[in-house]
């Protein structure tokens, strides 16, 4: 069955919404009925493809999401972690509040429910109508999954409500009911969404639904296991098994694999810099390309001192990357005092494909060392940047952004199986081992001992040596893809958000350093800008307030040293916006807010 491509529909639907209205002008939206809206298969195509416009995360939504995480620092700490400071109340929880939070767009849900209720035209074969209902139920499952992640219990609405419907004012339904409903929607989507692999990576298929079920399963399994206050730990294994079943089915299809060309220095990053999605690995992407005249601004965001957050990974996370021979970087006694060029040499090749290091150059041949007018910690993101320096200023990135990819499914499977106690050596080799091999690591075998660094990183709450390695791998493989905050929530590891923002090691002040490993001086750390400066050298100010060195005149950078951050367990959920409770008094606020 031929389905109109969502990347084309994007412009059709936006055109309708901005004034074209050739389709919706048939009848006002509020009075649409099956007889006028769903006469043909084309009508079903047009309506369901409109869901992509509102629910697909765009590039910015993906590559900025990890700004709320333990391993990213920026201009300021995440709002959810910033302490409210005033003369009368020095530290009063988080600046994130009922007034600053927001909910998902309920009209999106109503549009899906309207379609599901009215996709009943007997002139269209059941198999075709079921296909489009499967796509709609995928989007409803995805929408509700995002809502549960943010708010916990939410009202389950399975019908298109009218303005006088009493269910508009219903209370929040239990998490168990909502999650079971999400599972039912995904199972329907798996059974009825198109089974053919989509080479454009732009359409919802059975395989996208399996990927989402894998994601939902590992999230809910761990949330129930580690959030014992819910009293749902006994059912965590059911959700872990859902993840295993979905992941195994997707893997067994043979439709996807890790993108490899035999060049581990490039293969990982290629997945994030290609205009045409790497369809061997990518299951669903937000497609950007010149032909569509659809671009994003990843380069500008990650190379501008003013446009973005000045996203800067922290040393504690960079230290988790293994050496290329599979040994642990942090086993070296001096790992905290190694210079940046040496620190980044001979490591997991994903490191040099995720941050600027190791003599990185633009496509023009010009050196592009870490730019300290951008990075606060010395670690500058590279992963979603293309190599053309012109794109840094014209915001014409044409690289497509993966939303679901096979690597995530492998990580989900490994974690779920280890949590269930069923992970085998063969499982390890086909998941974590395969990811490490793609990154050029030579020894990819299962760990023989607990890594004390990883155990300490996770605050000595995990003693399982294999699970610690899976968590290491998840952070590295999915860096900047928007998963970390969800992982922190589900693992109940919010205290990681309090960790200091450490950066590169600085041997001494007032000394220029070459940070790209090419011998060219590009930064000096100073307490005041000198009267005489060296061309090409950025003078990074250590003011001993906002930014310090751990040992005073030398040591690791400490960024945002003077801004208090406060974690409270209420932050595992967002507050229900006060405006929503005014509209519906039956909604009850999340505990602590």
Image (tube, helix red, strand yellow):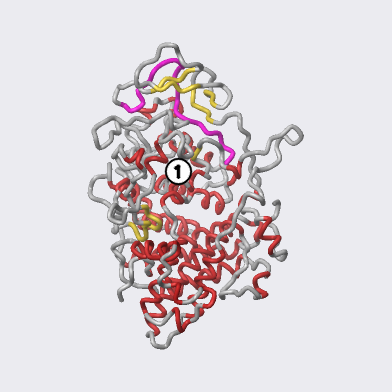
Residue at 58%, 29% (x, y): give it. Answer: 561
Q: Quadrant of residue 575?
A: bottom right
Q: Quadrant of the N terminus?
A: bottom left
In this rendering, the answer to whether 487 lies above or below 121 is above
Residue at 69%, 60% (x, y): give it. Answer: 581
From the viewer's side, name the closer residue of 581 and 360.
581
Circle 1 sits in a helix, a strand or a loop, which is it? loop
Q: Is residue 392 visible?
A: yes
Left or right: 236 in relation to 426: right
List x then y, in percent, for residue 172: 66, 66
- Which residue corresponds to mark 1? 449
From the viewer's side, name the closer residue of 83 and 48.
48
List x then y, in percent, for residue 493: 57, 47
List x then y, in percent, for residue 514: 35, 23
Residue occupying the far right of the picture: 88
Q: Quadrant of residue 110?
A: bottom right
In this rendering, the answer to whether 420 lies above or below 533 is below
In this rendering, the answer to whether 87 lies above or below 279 is above
List x then y, in percent, for residue 245: 43, 67
In this rendering, the answer to whether 500 lies above or below 506 is below
Magenta-colored stretch includes residue 209: no
Quick one: label 1, few (<14), some, or many (20+) residues within 10 Å?
Answer: few
Left or right: 215 in relation to 390: right
Magenta-colored stretch includes residue 499: yes
Give the number of marks.
1
Residue occupying the far top of the picture: 531
Specify start and end residues of the magenta stretch as a single range.
497-517
Q: Is residue 452 visible?
A: no
């Amino acid at each position: 069955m031929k389905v109109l491509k969502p990347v084309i529909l994007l412009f059709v639907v936006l055109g309708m919404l901005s004034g074209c209205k050739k389709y919706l002008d048939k009848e006002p939206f509020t009075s649409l009925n099956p007889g006028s809206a769903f006469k043909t298969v084309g009508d079903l195509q047009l309506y369901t493809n409109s869901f992509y416009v509102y629910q697909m995360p765009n590039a910015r939504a993906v590559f900025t999401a990890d700004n709320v995480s333990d391993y990213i620092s920026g201009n300021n700490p995440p709002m959810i972690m910033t302490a409210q400071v005033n003369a009368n109340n020095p530290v009063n929880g988080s600046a994130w509040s009922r007034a600053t939070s927001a909910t998902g767009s309920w009209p999106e849900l109503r549009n899906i429910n309207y379609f599901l209720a009215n996709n009943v035209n007997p002139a269209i074969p059941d198999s075709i109508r079921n296909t489009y209902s499967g796509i709609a139920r995928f989007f409803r499952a995805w929408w509700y999954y995002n809502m549960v992640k943010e708010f916990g219990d939410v009202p389950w609405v399975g019908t298109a409500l009218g303005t006088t419907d009493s269910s508009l004012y219903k209370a929040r339904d239990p998490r168990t009911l909502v999650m079971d409903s999400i599972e039912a929607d995904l199972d329907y989507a798996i059974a009825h969404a198109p089974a053919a692999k989509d080479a454009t990576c732009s359409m919802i298929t059975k395989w996208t639904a399996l990927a989402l079920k894998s994601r939902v399963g590992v999230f809910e399994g761990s949330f129930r296991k580690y959030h014992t206050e819910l009293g749902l730990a006994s059912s965590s294994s059911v959700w872990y098994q859902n993840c295993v079943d979905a992941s195994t089915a997707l893997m067994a299809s043979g439709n996807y694999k890790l993108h490899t060309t035999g060049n581990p220095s490039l293969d990982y990053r290629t997945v994030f810099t290609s205009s045409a999605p790497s369809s061997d690995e990518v299951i669903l992407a937000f497609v950007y390309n010149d032909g569509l005249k659809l671009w994003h601004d990843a380069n500008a965001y990650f190379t501008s001192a003013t446009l973005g957050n000045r996203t800067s990974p922290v040393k504690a996370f960079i230290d988790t990357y293994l050496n290329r021979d599979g040994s642990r970087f942090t086993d070296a006694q001096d790992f905290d005092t190694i210079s940046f060029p040496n620190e980044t040499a001979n490591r997991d090749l994903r490191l040099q494909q995720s941050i600027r290091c190791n003599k990185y150059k633009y496509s023009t041949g010009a050196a592009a060392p870490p730019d300290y007018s951008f990075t606060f910690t010395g670690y500058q993101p590279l992963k979603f940047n293309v190599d053309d320096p012109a794109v840094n200023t014209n915001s014409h990135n044409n690289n497509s952004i993966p939303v679901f990819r096979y690597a995530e499914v492998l990580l989900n499977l490994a974690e779920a199986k280890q949590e269930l106690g069923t992970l085998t050596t063969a499982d390890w080799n086909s998941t974590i081992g395969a990811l490490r091999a793609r990154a050029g690591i030579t020894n990819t075998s299962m760990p023989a001992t607990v890594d004390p660094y990883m155990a300490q990183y996770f605050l000595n709450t995990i003693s399982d040596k294999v699970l610690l390695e899976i968590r290491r791998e998840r952070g590295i493989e999915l860096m900047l893809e928007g998963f970390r905050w969800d992982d922190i929530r589900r693992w109940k590891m919010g205290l990681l958000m309090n960790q200091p923002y450490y950066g590169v090691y600085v041997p001494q002040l007032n000394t220029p350093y070459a940070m790209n490993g090419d011998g060219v001086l590009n930064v000096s750390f100073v307490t005041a800008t000198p009267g005489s400066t060296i061309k090409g050298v950025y003078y990074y100010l250590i003011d001993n307030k906002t930014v310090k060195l751990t040992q005073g005149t030398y040591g690791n950078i400490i960024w945002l040293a003077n801004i208090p951050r406060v974690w409270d367990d209420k932050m595992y959920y967002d507050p229900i916006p006060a405006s929503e409770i005014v509209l519906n008094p039956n909604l009850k606020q999340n505990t602590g807010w």
